[in-house]
Amino acid sequence: MRPGFANEMHPEQDVLPTPSRQERRQALREFQRQLVERAHLARSGSNSEQMRLAVQAGDQQLLLDVAHTAEVIPNEGVKRVPHTCAWFLGLINCRGRLMGVIDLSGFLGRPVKPSQDSDRLLILSDSLAVPCALRVSRVTGLVSLSGFTLQPKPADESPWVRSFFVDRESCSWRLLDLPLLMEDPAFLDVVAR
């Protein structure tokens, strides 16, 4: 310390420590617990038809039906399967169930990017036909459609994109119909050609 500057902070004291892996996992568990509680409230509340799970997949903002998602987990433990499409990331064992992992952005036609620490796996509900997880770049949380403005759907859009919306910040969002997406033959055809 310089003379006369007894209260001066050292630069290294201004830096926050990087959270440990255990702290990050705990924060994710807490986020998931809060998300599950809010999803339960959204399903049972009077505005349940208005609530959607907001996610980012690559550069796309997407909305999913809350009832079609079971949980959010870290993007870990995915085992690659040879001779499959680039967007089919592999298989995971989630609570004793083997399921495929799809890079949602890649399936939607964007390049499949390497995994990031912020990526999450959305485990889809048992109510859907195919047991799988979707890799997304970020889970924003639950949002109400009352804060969005419905836009015309482009004629050339995939049939499983139910609606287009714009939020208050003028960001575009696509509402996906996951059951319809899973009926698409391309979704089930993971073999590389």
Image (cartoon, helix red, strand yellow):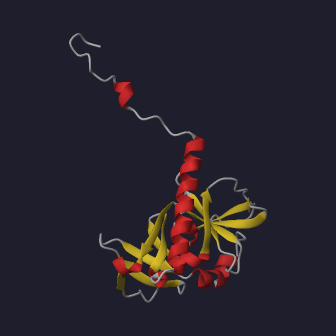
Q: Residue at x 40, y 79 (%)?
A: 145
Q: Is residue 67 above or below residue 134?
A: below
Residue closer to the observer: 53 or 171: 53
Q: Residue at x 44, y 64 (%)?
A: 59
Residue 49's x, y, as percent? 48, 84
Residue 50, quarter of picture: bottom left
Q: Is residue 2 above or below residue 183?
A: above
Residue 130, quarter of picture: bottom right
Residue 193, quarter of picture: bottom right
Q: Is residue 19 above or below residue 76?
A: above
Residue 95's x, y, as percent? 75, 61
In the image: residue 145, left or right of residue 2: right
In the image: residue 152, left or right of residue 57: left
Q: Is residue 148 visible?
A: no
Among all residues in the image, which is located at the extreme top? 3
Q: Residue at x 55, y 46 (%)?
A: 24
Residue 94's x, y, as percent? 72, 61
Residue closer to the observer: 1 or 6: 6
Count up the numbered dots: 0
In the image: residue 111, left or right of residue 145: right
Residue 157's x, y, as percent? 47, 84
Q: Is residue 153 visible?
A: yes
Q: Residue at x 53, y 72 (%)?
A: 39
Query: Where is the N terminus found, in terms of image quarters?
Result: top left
